[in-house]
Image (cartoon, grey):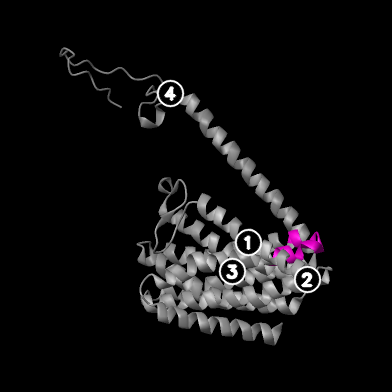
Amino acid sequence: MSIPHASHAPSQAPVAASPAPAYVEAGAAGEGGDGTVQPAYLRWQGHWRQRLGLGIVLLGAVVLALHGWRMVATQPLVRDALLGGLLAALATALGAVPVWFSQQLSARVQDTLFGFGAGVMLAACSFSLILPGLQAARAAGAGGWAAGGTIGAAILLGAAALLCLERWLPHEHFIKGVEGQASRTLRRTWLFVFAIALHNLPEGLAIGVAYAGGDALRAGALTTGIAIQDVPEGLVVAVALLAAGYRRTLAVGLGMASGLVEPLGAVLGAVVISHSASLLPWGLGFAAGAMLFVISHEIIPESHRKGHEAWATGGLMWGFVLMMLLDTALG
């Protein structure tokens, strides 16, 4: 890097620059915080620290994965929850596939699909989470007021947890824009990823908690409903990313990967609830509160923002009825 002289310095005859020592490299990459040039071996030490830290993180991830695999292999409820979460993730991936071939999806259709997903999630909260939670609380010996108070407190707790994540985790809405701390320092792609994770985590938790409750039919109905609404959700995510200016491959890839947080949430919910049956009402209510927060704070506002409220509401009604029928027929 050339070193600028002060403007008042006297002119001097050009002198051939002597080669720098081997351990010093000029350039912005070698400058320290005070503008001085750092020796190369110091920078190599920093690189090795980063690589060592990355290796430790990867090793920890492998250990956790092996531990989780043993847990899945030995606990049928956790295994069923994982399979349910994977089914939902697969449905999300399938929904993103059509974007490979066409990007034509009108704003009205997007809002209708958003409303459909909100309706499915509302019905899932009512029939597959809140009502079973009340039944579980009463089965544990709670009276009517105590059961209602328990589920009500769990719903508020789940909504508060998602509110805290929404405030602290930087993310970006497809239409609303950037929210959360430190959002300007992150690439917009990752802001979209965080937003998708916030959206899908409650769905995974709901699947896991439902399977941990031991009612396979009701859990299957909930998983089926979530998987059905995940198909248009994956499509909308990919189309929104494509419309935001991302390459088709990246938009489709993120759309397909957006559901991967669901099996993780399903395993987490099943593991926590399976350790104590007394936590089942709290888990069901918590998952319902988290999903209700996402519906009210994320999905419905996004579906109404472009002026297609009637279409979005119609989609919501159809989604609610479909999930109600699934829960009645299968649960």
Q: Report, in whole angstroms, how far the alpha carbon at label 3 lies from the one at label 2.
A: 28 Å
Q: Counting other residues with Cα less than 10 Å from the Cα at mark 2, is it few (<14), some (14-19), or many (20 or more)?
A: many
Give the secondary structure at mark 3.
helix
Vertical position of residue 113 compared to residue 78: above or below: below
Q: Magenta segment, which residues?
A: 271-284
Give the percent coordinates (x, y) of residue 279: 77, 61
Q: CA distance from mark 4 to mark 3?
A: 47 Å
The answer for how far apart the CA atoms under marks 1 and 2 are is 18 Å
Q: Is residue 181 above or below residue 272?
A: above
Q: Residue at x 38, y 62 (%)?
A: 247
Per the rendering, the mark at residue 156 is 1
Name the residue nearer the viewer: 171 or 136.
Answer: 136
Which circle's residue, 3 or 2, is located before the other in the chain? Answer: 3
Q: Position of residue 26 (x, y in %)?
A: 36, 26
Quadrant assignment, res 251: bottom left
Q: Are marks 1 and 4 in contact (CB under 8 Å)?
A: no
- Report how far apart the C-alphas of labels 2 and 4 lie in the structure: 64 Å
Q: Amino acid at mark 3?
A: Ala
For the residues labelled 2 and 4, say whether their Cβ atoms are less than 8 Å apart. Answer: no
Q: Which residue is the extreme one toward the front? A: 145
Per the image, the residue denoted by label 3 is 89
Residue at the spot of label 2: 136
Q: Is residue 52 magenta?
A: no
- Amino acid at pointer 4: Gln
